[in-house]
Amino acid sequence: MPQRPYIVGNWKMHGTRAMLSEARAIDRAAQRHMKVEVAIAPPYTLIHPVHREAEQIAVGAQDCHHEEGGAHTGDISATMVADAGAKFVILGHSERRQNHGESDALIKQKTNAALAAGLRIILCCGESEKTREAGKAVNFVKKQLKASLPDFGDDTDLISEKLTVAYEPIWAIGTGKTATVDDIAEMHAEIRTLLVSLYGEEQGGEVRILYGGSVKPENASEILGTPEVGGALVGGASLTADSFMGIALAAGDAEEG
Ligand code: 13P
């Protein structure tokens, strides 16, 4: 059975305890829109407070270290975020790849660590403007994704629940630019083909593929109505309940339409 549309807020480095009221408002609104799965990934410091207050939405982390523990000052493991109440972790975001030099190989280690800690994964991929202009976007994204996916081994039963892919073209993040519907449809179809070839129709066909990059209430219907778009990973517009739930509402409508 197809999964519900998945609308995930990535709060990035935004949010102090003053933002808890916004998280509460998102949670309350999500209770009225059960056709859509709503989740937020606040900064580490708010994972536990949001988890304690949320009745409906899942809370997640924006990253984790690839080891379970050790002498890694300032780092946080998958086990720790799970202990704080996180149910999922975003991995391979382009801001981590760019600002922290994260390679596909490291992200693969992180996805494996997340699985071992019982977390669901939102694995991000996406090309730069230069790569798109060179006509190499599809090949780049498929290669990046393949190299960062976890090793599911023989444990293939629940892949579509454990794994979500987020396609986020780097040039569309925080810029107000979005990819065209045709480009999104093409990339999502290519990602779907890859997932089916790796995990078979039953699991690979059901993994949700989110789009991310300047998604707002105003453009959400069009984006979420695009074939193979199973939801959205939202940055700026997830910081207020009003705009974030505007996107969730559009997801519910796209589901019905
Ligand atoms: P914006 O929605 O602010 O463009 O951010 C997208 C993003 O990076 C979500 O992970």
Image: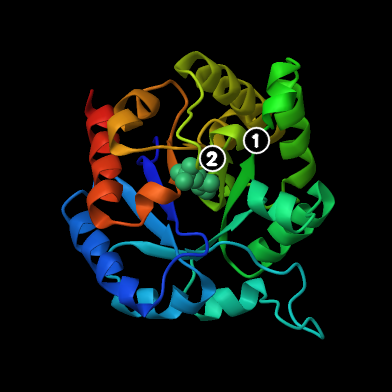
Q: Earlier in the sequence, mark 1 or mark 2?
A: 1
State the quadrant of the N terminus: top left
Report if the beta carbon of the residue with label 2 is closer than 8 angstroms to ligand 1: yes
State the quadrant of the C terminus: top left
Left or right: where 69 falls relative to 169: right
Give whichever of 231, 239 is nearer the camera.
Answer: 239
Q: Position of residue 36 (x, y in %)?
A: 29, 45
Q: Nearer the viewer, mark 1 or mark 2?
A: 2
Question: Residue drawn 22% across and 51% down?
Answer: 242
Report if the beta carbon of the residue with label 1 is closer than 8 angstroms to ligand 1: no
Above or below for 67 versus 115: below
Question: Residue drawn 39% across and 44% down?
Answer: 6
Q: Is residue 3 visible?
A: yes
Q: Residues within 10 Å of mark 1 (few under 14, many from 20)?
A: many
Q: Give the residue pinned by disc 1.
A: 126
- Label number found at residue 177: none
Specify the amino acid type for callout 2.
Ile
Specify the amino acid type for callout 1.
Gly
| CB contact under 8 Å: marks 1 and 2 | yes
